Image: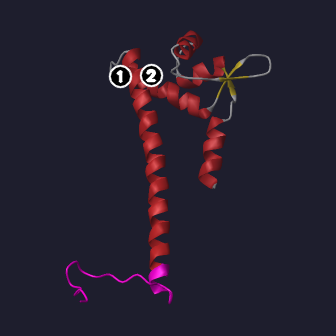
């Protein structure tokens, strides 16, 4: 539950564009360009002011790393971010399936120990047919 709260806190919109740009080490116009390219999606206040979260700032820093240090163009950054989202979705799905498999394993073990378990494992071809 604490992890979920931390994720929620990281998503909370806190910073106006000028503060977000300073924290990310970029010009506010760059943030607007990234928003148009859908590389970052700040939330909006009731007055339509862009508000950036900690997660947005981290995303901006990653974009800056990829473009300035790694030399990747914005189209490449878009693809990398898409793939990262897909990896995260697959991680969540894998974790869900792992928990489900563990639950099924526990249920099968309980059923095997139960007195009413009527399942008997027989190796194929070992039963004699009755005449």
User: Residue tagged by mark 1?
Assistant: 69
- Image position of 11 with respect to 64: above or below: below
Q: Estimate the x, y position of residue 12 in percent, counting from the top left.
A: 68, 35
- Whether the magenta-drawn stretch holds residue 114 is answered as yes
Q: Main secondary structure of the magenta part?
A: loop
Residue at image position (44%, 47%) is 91
Snapshot quadrant of residue 48: top right
Residue at the outermost front position: 131
Q: Is residue 47 left or right of residue 87?
A: right
Image position of 15 (left or right of 47): left
User: Residues at badges 2 and 1 in contact (C-beta under 8 Å)?
Assistant: yes
On screen, residue 26 versus residue 10, left or right, reads left
Instruction: Give, as a single range, the part of the protein colored magenta.
Output: 110-131
**Image colouring:** secondary structure
- Distance from label 2 to label 1 (Cα)? 8 Å
Label 1 Cα crowd, 10 Å radius (few <14 / some 14-19 / many 20+): few
Quarter in which the N terminus is drawn:
bottom right
First-in-chain label (2 vs 1): 2
* x, y percent for residue 7: 60, 43
Residue 19, horizontal then vertical, whole percent: 65, 22
Asked if residue 55 lies left or right of residue 95, the reply is right
Q: SS class of the residue under badge 2?
A: helix
Q: State which quarter of the image contains the C terminus.
A: bottom left
Query: Residue at the right extreme?
Result: 46
Question: Which residue is disc 2 drawn over?
Answer: 64
Q: Residue at (65%, 17%) from the top-left corner?
A: 18
């Amino acid at each position: 539950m604490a992890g979920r709260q931390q994720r929620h806190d990281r998503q909370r919109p806190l910073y106006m564009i000028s503060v977000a740009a300073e924290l990310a080490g970029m010009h506010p116009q760059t943030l607007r360009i990234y928003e148009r390219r859908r590389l970052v999606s700040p939330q909006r206040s009731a007055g339509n002011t862009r508000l950036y979260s900690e997660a947005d700032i981290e995303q901006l820093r990653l974009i800056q790393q990829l473009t300035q240090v790694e030399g990747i163009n914005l189209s490449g950054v878009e693809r990398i971010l898409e793939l990262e989202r897909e990896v995260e979705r697959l991680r969540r799905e894998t974790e869900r399936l792992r928990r489900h498999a563990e639950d099924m394993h526990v249920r099968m073990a309980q059923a095997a120990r139960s007195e009413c378990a009527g399942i008997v494992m027989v190796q194929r071809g070992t039963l004699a047919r009755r005449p």
